[in-house]
Image (spheres, rainbow, N blue to C red):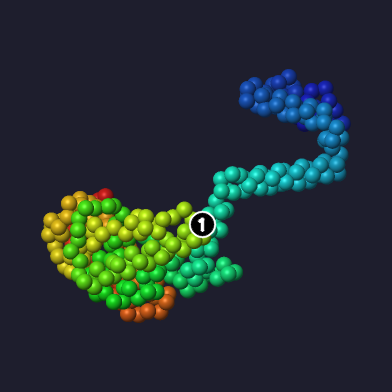
Amino acid sequence: ILYGGEGREYMAGLAALNPQKDMRIKDFEFIESFRHRLDMEEQLKSTATCAVCLCDPEKRKTNLEAARAAGALEKRISRLRAALSDDRISLLGELEQRTNVLKALDYIAEDKSVLLKGRVACEINTCDCLIVTELIFENVLDELDGPEAVALLSTLVYQRRSDDDPQLTPELDKALTRLNKITRAIGNVQLKYGMDVSPDQYARDQIHTGLAQVAYEWAAGTKFYQICEMTDIPEGSIVRCILRLHETLKDVRNAARVIGDPKLYQKMEACAEIIKRDIVFAASLYVS
């Protein structure tokens, strides 16, 4: 009944009612909405394409379908423009470089399907997945006992520089040398395929030995107050490192399951258990 406005005949021949004069509606918001609708109808009438379709259902349907199609095309254009933005284009080169690195290291095949090393890398979430994966496939961890393996992985988890000179076992010292060699090799591959990486700087940024001795002693059963006396690193940083190290050990354990290495699986499972003790893993109101 209200369709069409004052002084205009309704489709069925009935005169349109004015909400203020005829129906005595006083609600301000309703009156404003009604007037806005009348204004929209006037705009539609002034458009040649839509002047007739208000009263012609067939033309109205056709025009609505065309409007929907035009709206869908506009959305697609917006998405394509966003995809072609400068930021997106700048990332395409890096994506290709990283893809080539993964192919060179046998993480993905030429058709970009994920290989075994790639599946192992997907299990590592707490530190550089490429370095840890190479450690696993080079059998570096297999040659270490539990505390030594914990100490070696701590060098990838702890990410702050320290002036401490850790006292390492001969086997751990050899493993650390191999770790540096593996990390530089990965850096060289990245440099070869155009990434802005210095192999030596990459190794320095990824490997930090500040808590290696602390992690070794903790895994060997030393009390917390005693390991705190071995370093000037704050107790909170030690706790955070051990907590993250526990997650890393579980990641490597899961990676061992992927490659079917029960010996490494059992070693990482045991390491995760021996460091999960005392005040470091005590329940806290701040974290639980």
Quadrant location of the C terminus in the rendered image: bottom left
Q: Nearer the viewer, residue 123 or 134?
A: 134
- Per the image, the residue denoted by label 1 is 194
Query: Considering depth in this image, is 73 or 43 the residue closer to the camera?
Result: 73
The quadrant where residue 246 appears: bottom left
Residue at 32% across, 59% down: 207
For the N terminus, give its image quadrant.
top right
Q: Amino acid at mark 1?
A: Gly
Q: Is residue 132 visible?
A: no
**Compared to 209, does 136 lie above or below?**
below
Q: Position of residue 159 (x, y in %)?
A: 31, 54
Classify residue 162 as left or right of residue 255. Answer: left
Which SS class for mark 1? loop
Residue 79 vertical position relative to residue 53 in the rendered view, above or below? below
Residue 249 or residue 131, whichever sits in front = 131
Of residues 285 and 127, the one drawn nearer to the viewer in this rendering: 127
Q: Is residue 278 left or right of residue 40?
A: left
Could you say where residue 248 lies in the image, as x and y percent from the top left? 33, 64
Q: How many marks?
A: 1
What residue is rendered at 44% in x and 55% in y? 197
Q: Which residue in the rendered view is the most extreme toward the top?
A: 21
The image shows residue 115 at horizontal and vertical percentages of 51, 72
Mark 1 neighbour density, 10 Å: few (under 14) some (14–19) many (20 or more): some
Residue pictured at 29% horizontal, 70% vertical: 175
State the residue at coordinates (56%, 58%).
96
* Res. 258 visible in picture: yes
Q: Position of residue 84 (x, y in %)?
A: 63, 47
